[in-house]
């Protein structure tokens, strides 16, 4: 079975933008403004001044060394500690940065300036509670500081406190409605609460307000539209996401699976193949591609791709399950048994795997063995569809298992559910029409045939041949 892929956050990029605003504020401060009654001596000041020169030249290691020399001479030197901590930040030495910033704070350096840097360093260290405290303290000193307000949003978002993140981003947008990045992260926050309507609206606003995250915004739109059961609009959103940012790796699977649900198998295959070109080691893409080739009756290609899938994803049971199916379709039944057995060691009691394993034994004229596995297939697929009621192919497979197990009425109900979720799925209509035919419901069988003529004439002909044989 295929599972939906959900997306990771790009918060770090916004942080760089947000922090640059703080930097401009901080750099406006006098480099050696000493906010302490105990003044450093002249030698320490000279060393700190040399550190300032190195800092301004972005030679941060040399700056740190000079500030350190100044501190040895005058340990109570808040400005030297502050700028030393700031230089450590630029070198991604966050522990040292916090240590010096804390010393500067304790020695009386301007608290507001400490908060502007220290919240971000703590954020990078994933010390979100400490970062939150600094941002809140900064807001007490400057209640209208949009950067601190946005910082609250980013911190709450990473703490997965979505309601507070939403409140913070909304407040920041009251100050700066044109901030496209804030609209984007507001959309991300709405996604965290499951509010797909506002998720989509905020993502649209993000694009219109020129967010840096255009591709990611389209992805959020697509996710929301899938939830809203608007597949055509979701497809457009995902296509735009990849046009803007082809490196959005997960979107290839999201888009291809949506094409699969609409029985646009050639589009699904083409999408994954584009993804494979950029991400040739992505085993999940090969797993999906094997399935799509099988659905498109391109069985030999399914075998070739499936062999690559098991190499790239040796711990993914679906890689072996899909290859098992492909081997069945190419009449390589002993290889199919091997692959299905391997899949079951990784995922015991998987209904789909048992279905293909039963078929492999059935095709080898071992009905007694096959019957037991068909029963296990039914049990496993009932469990799967109960847990994944929106995945259409699960019901198609369940219908197949019911039919093989001699339960035609239940097979019909499973195929009907499959087609409710995926009306254009031709294989489901072929099988449903044939079940109706076997049940002597000829008018219902003809109805499926007529619908197939509109959807896929080739599949309609397959159904006709099945009925003619009887």
Image (cartoon, rainbow, N blue to C red):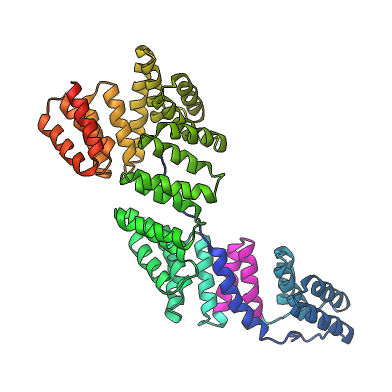
Q: Quadrant of the N terminus?
A: top left
Residue at the image position 84 percent from the left and 76 percent from the top: 66
- The part of the image, by quadrant, that contains residue 291 is top left
Residue 113 on image: x %, y % = 65, 80
Count of picture labels: 0
Q: Please state which of residues 377 and 387 is positioned toward the viewer in this rendering.
A: 377
Residue 134 position by quadrant? bottom right
- Residue 257 or residue 67, whichever sits in front: 257
Residue at x 51% of width, y 47% of height: 276
Residue found at the very far left of the displayed protein: 443
Q: Is residue 454 found left or right of 393 in the rendered image? A: left
Q: Residue 450 appears at what percent x and percent y?
A: 15, 39
Question: Does residue 54 appear anywhere in the picture?
Answer: yes
State whether residue 96 is above or below residue 350: below
Does 128 lie within the magenta span? yes
Q: Is residue 4 above or below residue 314?
A: below
Q: Residue at x 43, y 20 (%)?
A: 333
Q: Is residue 120 left or right of residue 171?
A: right
Above or below, 28 relative to 362: below
Image quarter (top left, top right, bottom left or bottom right) of the C terminus: top left
What secondary structure is the stretch in magenta mostly built from? helix
Q: Position of residue 111 (x, y in %)?
A: 65, 79
Please say if 435 is above or below 252. above
Q: Is residue 413 visible?
A: no
Which of these two is toward me, 167 or 420? 420
Magenta span of residues = 111-139
- In reply to whether residue 171 is colored magenta, the answer given is no
277 relative position to 58: left or right:
left
Q: Of residues 457 and 159, which is closer to you in this image?
A: 457
Q: Residue 174: where, in percent of width, then height?
A: 42, 79
């Amino acid at each position: 079975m295929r599972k939906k892929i959900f997306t990771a956050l790009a918060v770090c990029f916004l942080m760089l933008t947000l922090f640059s605003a703080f930097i401009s504020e901080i750099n406006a401060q006098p480099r050696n403004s000493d906010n302490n009654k105990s003044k450093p001596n002249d030698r320490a000041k000279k060393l700190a001044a040399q550190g300032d020169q190195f800092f301004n030249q972005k030679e941060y290691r040399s700056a740190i060394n000079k500030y350190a020399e100044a501190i040895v001479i005058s340990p109570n030197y808040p400005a030297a500690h502050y700028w030393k901590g700031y230089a450590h930040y630029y070198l991604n030495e966050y522990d040292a940065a916090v240590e010096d910033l804390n010393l500067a704070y304790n020695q009386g350096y301007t608290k507001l300036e400490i908060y502007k840097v220290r919240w971000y360093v703590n954020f990078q260290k994933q010390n979100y509670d400490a970062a939150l405290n600094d941002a809140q303290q900064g807001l007490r000193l400057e209640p209208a500081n949009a950067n601190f307000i946005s910082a609250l949003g980013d911190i709450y978002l990473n703490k997965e406190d979505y309601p507070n993140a939403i409140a913070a981003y909304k407040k920041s947008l009251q100050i700066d409605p044109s901030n496209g990045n804030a609209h984007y992260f507001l959309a991300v926050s709405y996604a965290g609460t499951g509010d797909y309507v506002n998720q989509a609206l905020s993502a649209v606003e993000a694009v219109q307000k020129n967010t840096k995250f255009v591709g990611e915004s389209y992805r959020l739109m697509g996710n929301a539209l899938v939830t809203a059961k608007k597949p055509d609009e979701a497809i457009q959103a995902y296509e735009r996401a990849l046009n803007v940012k082809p490196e959005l790796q997960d979107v290839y699977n999201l888009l291809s699976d949506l094409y699969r649900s609409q029985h646009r198998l050639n589009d699904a295959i083409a999408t994954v193949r584009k993804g494979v070109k950029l991400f040739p080691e992505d085993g999940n893409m090969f797993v999906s591609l094997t399935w799509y080739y099988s659905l498109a009756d391109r069985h030999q290609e399914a075998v070739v791709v499936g062999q690559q899938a098991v190499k790239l994803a040796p711990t993914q049971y679906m890689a072996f399950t899909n290859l098992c199916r492909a081997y069945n379709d190419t009449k390589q039944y002993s290889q199919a048994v091997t692959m299905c057995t391997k899949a079951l060691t990784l995922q015991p009691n998987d209904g789909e795997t048992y279905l293909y394993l039963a078929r492999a034994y059935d095709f080898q004229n071992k009905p007694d063995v096959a019957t037991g596995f068909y029963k296990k297939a039914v049990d496993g697929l009932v469990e799967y569809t109960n847990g994944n009621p929106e995945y259409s192919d699960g019901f198609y497979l369940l219908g197949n298992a019911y039919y093989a197990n001699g339960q035609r009425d239940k097979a019909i109900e499973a195929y009907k559910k499959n087609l409710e979720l995926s009306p254009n799925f031709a294989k489901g209509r072929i099988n449903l029409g044939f079940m109706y035919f076997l049940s002597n419901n000829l008018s219902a069988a003809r109805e499926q045939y007529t619908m197939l003529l509109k959807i896929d004439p080739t599949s309609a002909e397959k159904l006709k041949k099945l009925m003619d044989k009887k």
